[in-house]
Image (cartoon, rainbow, N blue to C red):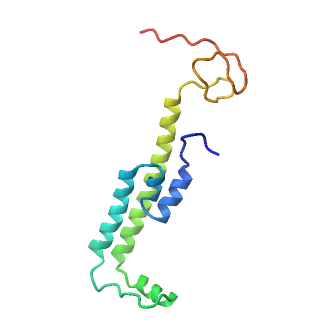
Amino acid sequence: MTETGRKRPLLAVVLAFIFPGLGHFYLRKWGRGLLWLGLLFTLSVLLVVTGTIQPVSELTLEAISSAYQSRPTEVTIGSVVITTLNVVDAYWVAVNENQTQEVEAGVKCPNCGKEIDQDIDFCHWCTTQLEPVEPDQQ
């Protein structure tokens, strides 16, 4: 599993691929998620002209397929572009957030590399004795 607070970039990518904005909601980036969701909604409203897509009277595979095929090419291209950019952005945000948390975490053991408390003089993971850290002199 992941460390506490770390986000899984692959999960964010999968959620963003399923529907734009979901990956960002998983990352708790509410504004970004709403932006991607709004972009897809705006594309749908602006590019789908009333009457272009026929309403589906029955939920059969043929009816749904014909409704899907009747949508304009611009809508298809736009939704593919938005989804692709959304997936890349979700991955980028997850990776950067994880890197930021690692930098903020502080001290790591020189032997095992796991995070340790600054107040103790040994690693509680591998019991390596640590050198005392002198405060930075400026």
Residue displayed at 37% across by 59% down: 36
Left or right? Give the position of 126 relative to 25. right
Q: Taking 114 as reference, is 48 above or below it?
A: below
Q: Position of residue 85 (x, y in %)?
A: 41, 58
Where, quadrant-wise, is the C terminus in this rendering? top left
Q: Position of residue 131 (x, y in %)?
A: 63, 13
In the image, residue 54 sits, relative to residue 33, either above or below, namely below
Residue drawn where x is 45% and y is 64% of the image: 19
Count of marks placed on residues = 0
The residue sitting at 29% across, 72% down in the picture is: 45
Left or right: where 56 falls relative to 131: left
> In this picture, is 11 found above or below 132?
below
Check the image and report above or below for 114 versus 127: below
Residue 92: image x %, image y %? 46, 48
Question: From the viewer's perspective, is 87 left or right of 74?
Answer: right
Which residue is found at the position 35% from the left and 51% from the top? Answer: 31
In the picture, measured across the screen, residue 20 lies left or right of residue 130, that is left
Q: Position of residue 43 (x, y in %)?
A: 31, 69
Given residues 122 and 138, the one toward you in this image is 122
